[in-house]
Image (cartoon, helix red, strand yellow):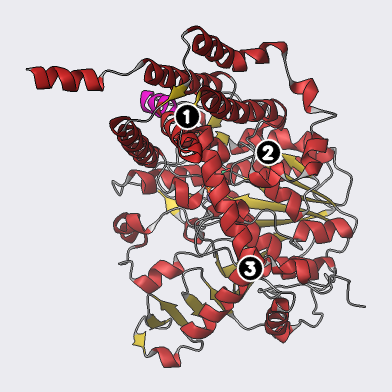
């Protein structure tokens, strides 16, 4: 009995420990309130609310443990300074958010230019009520003085309990986040999502880790590293061909068609075409029927990256989020140097895929994100603004741009899980495989097709069509491997590994008003778009690093390499370590496979090196005379 009461007594927190808990509770609740009231985080369910409430606790405990370990004691001053540091971090984010609607990143901290953008000074963004951020600190100081608390001693059980609680909470937090957004940490996606699921403090820790990793790799580089790359890519410098300069001085309208795969073109449901508009359009356009997406984990952003840079995306993560500070010599920048105005249009949050920061490095003058559009519950679904209102509302913005312009439109409605919430948006029956995603897919594709028709009509009505070329591409697959069973029903064949590769074909259409259409057999991919467009526009980018090749070039080698090392040539498909004949699907000894997986691996590794070591900063970009 006596022993038990001693244990209980031992567990009962001392006055100092109570004080420490109070400081932690203040900081925790404050962090939650800031996230809830000052950041506009879309909370969709109770679990997300719970995650938001939970996520500051782990880092708050770690903060005080760290403060203790730092001086081997924890004085009142130590507690107040620690509290102040985290408070300041949330406050800095809150102020930054007021202006940028975004969270601070490590590179932003070091970019004085960005603070210039703050529009004078951060002072203007501060508000009188902001003193509330610091009220608990004053309160703590008063309590400490009144109760004469000086030093918190860390008894073993307290320290152990805190370490255990912090680690358990962090793991629990990450696991919960993972249920809501799988692969959040490996793919990053969106700062808003990171803050929502991990909290501001964990987000900063993660951001710090990612940037340290990137800068460590960058530090490895030497100026001479670029020579190996230059020698490799300059192998096949293209000669002018019959398409060179045919679109000189024209506006370039680029449309990213969300999740659009080639098989849906000319596909019918109950006798109705899924893409009636595109089917007609390709008759009057250069249509590349052997064109593949080459994206990795960065999906839409990887497609944008491939097209703007003619470099491969990274083996993991999205270049848009990991290497946005790099030096690039991207299509928009080259066009800008040639008198174009450059812009991107997208009806979603600007920090998704870190576009707001990456676009600066790629040379976009304007980014018309969701804040430029009237987005309501009524005209949005899934990720954001529906494609039809998106195109309709884009017209006045597009008209405001000086010509010639390079304008990219990123559609959104045909995104997994392929939802249409209004009767009027459904223009075709669903499929009947029993796999919901596959069945609904044709309906959102049909909607996308309709939006393109409306956009083309609007371009004509507004006098933009005639002096533009319009280039459309599917960004990546829509139906993943997980739906192979339903897909085999749809196309009437078993999905073997080589057929799976063939299903990675996405439409690529170059529409030049007034020019006759042509079906192109050329085998190529998104990596070839930049050199192809520059050739059409008659622009010589000078000393540039391009892993792709002009799709109209007569000397081009017909092949495409995928991010996972698979490749397709005229006669073969190599994937998962096996080479297949295209003619009859038979398995071939890989030594006869036209290319070797070593060659392909070398090309991918070289492109990765350019990105990870930021090698384009060493490139002499003066145009070749
Ligand atoms: C988000 C949109 C969709 O802004 O681009 O991205 P995804 O998930 O297709 O990469
Ligand atoms: Mn996409």
Q: Which residues are magenta?
A: 46-53
- Residue 473 vertical placement versus 353 (above, below): below
In this rendering, the label closer to the viewer, 3 or 1: 1
- Give the residue at mark 1: 74
Viewport quadrant of the C terminus: bottom right
Mark sitting earlier along the chain (2/3): 2
- Give the residue at mark 2: 391
The majority secondary structure of the magenta stretch comes to: helix
Viewport quadrant of the N terminus: top left
Residue 480 appears in which quarter of the rendering?
Answer: bottom left
Secondary element at image label 2 = helix
Residue 346 appears in which quarter of the rendering?
Answer: top right
Residue at 55 percent across and 52 percent down: it is 210
- Disc 2 and disc 3 in contact, CB within 8 angstroms: no
Residue 48 on the magenta span: yes
Residue at 64 percent across and 70 percent down: it is 220
- Disc 3 and disc 1 in contact, CB within 8 angstroms: no
Secondary element at image label 1 = strand
The residue closer to the viewer here, 63 or 527, is: 63
- Residue 327 vertical placement versus 416 (above, below): below
Residue 20 on the magenta span: no
The residue closer to the viewer here, 265 or 238, is: 238
């Amino acid at each position: 009995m006596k022993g038990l009461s001693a244990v209980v007594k031992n567990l009962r927190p001392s006055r100092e420990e109570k004080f420490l808990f109070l400081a932690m509770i203040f900081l925790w609740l404050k962090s939650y309130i800031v996230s809830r009231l000052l950041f506009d985080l879309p909370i969709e369910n109770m679990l997300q609310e719970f995650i938001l409430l939970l996520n500051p606790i782990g880092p708050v405990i770690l903060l005080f443990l760290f403060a203790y370990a730092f001086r081997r004691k924890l004085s009142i001053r130590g507690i107040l300074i620690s509290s102040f540091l985290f408070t300041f971090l949330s406050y800095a984010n809150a102020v930054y958010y007021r202006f940028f609607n975004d969270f601070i990143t490590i590179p932003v901290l070091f970019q004085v230019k960005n603070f210039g953008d703050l529009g004078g000074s951060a002072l203007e963004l501060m508000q009188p009520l902001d003193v509330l951020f610091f009220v608990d600190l004053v309160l703590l100081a008063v309590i400490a003085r009144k109760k004469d608390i000086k030093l918190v001693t860390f008894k073993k059980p307290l320290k152990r309990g805190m370490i255990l609680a912090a680690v358990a909470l962090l793991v629990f937090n990450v696991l919960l986040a993972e249920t809501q957004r799988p692969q959040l940490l490996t793919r990053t996606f969106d700062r808003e999502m990171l803050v929502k699921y991990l909290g501001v403090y964990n987000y900063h820790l993660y951001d710090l880790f990612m940037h340290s990793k990137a800068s460590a790799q960058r530090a490895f580089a030497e100026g001479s590293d670029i020579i190996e790359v230059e020698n490799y890519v300059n192998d096949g410098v293209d000669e002018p061909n019959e398409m060179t300069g045919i679109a000189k001085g024209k506006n370039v309208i680029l449309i990213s068609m969300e999740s659009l795969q080639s098989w849906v073109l000319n596909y019918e449901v109950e006798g109705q075409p899924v893409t009636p508009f595109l089917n007609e359009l390709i008759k009057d356009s250069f249509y590349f029927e052997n064109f593949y997406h080459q994206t990795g984990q960065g999906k839409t952003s990887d497609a944008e990256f491939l097209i703007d840079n003619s470099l491969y995306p990274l083996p993991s993560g999205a270049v848009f989020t990991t290497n946005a500070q790099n030096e690039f010599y991207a299509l928009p920048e080259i066009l800008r140097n040639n008198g174009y105005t450059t812009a991107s249009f997208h009806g979603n949050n600007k920090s998704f895929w870190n576009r707001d920061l990456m676009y600066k490095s790629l040379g976009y003058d304007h980014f018309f994100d969701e804040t430029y559009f009237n987005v309501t519950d009524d005209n949005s679904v899934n990720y954001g603004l529906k494609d039809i209102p998106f195109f309709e509302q884009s017209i006045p913005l597009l008209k405001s741009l000086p010509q010639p312009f390079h304008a990219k439109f990123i559609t959104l409605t045909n995104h997994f899980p392929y939802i249409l919430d209004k009767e009027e948006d459904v223009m075709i029956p669903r499929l009947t495989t029993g796999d919901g995603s596959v069945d609904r897919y044709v309906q959102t594709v049909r909607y996308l097709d309709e939006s393109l028709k409306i956009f083309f009509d609007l371009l004509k009505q507004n006098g933009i069509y005639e002096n533009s070329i319009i280039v459309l591409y599917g960004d990546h697959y829509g139906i993943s491997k997980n739906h192979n069973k339903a897909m085999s029903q749809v196309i009437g064949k078993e999905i073997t590994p080589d057929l799976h590769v063939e299903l990675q074909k996405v439409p690529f259409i170059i529409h030049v008003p007034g020019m006759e259409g042509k079906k192109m057999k050329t085998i190529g991919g998104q990596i070839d778009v930049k050199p192809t467009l520059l050739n059409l526009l008659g622009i010589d980018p000078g000393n540039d690093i391009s892993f792709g090749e002009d799709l109209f070039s007569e000397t081009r080698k017909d092949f495409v390499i995928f991010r996972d090392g698979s490749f397709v040539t005229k006669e073969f498909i190599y994937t998962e370590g096996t080479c297949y004949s295209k003619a009859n699907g038979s398995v071939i000894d890989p030594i006869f496979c036209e290319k070797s997986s070593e060659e392909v691996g070398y090309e991918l590794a070289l492109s990765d090196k350019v990105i990870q070591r930021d090698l384009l900063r060493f490139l002499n970009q003066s145009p070749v005379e």
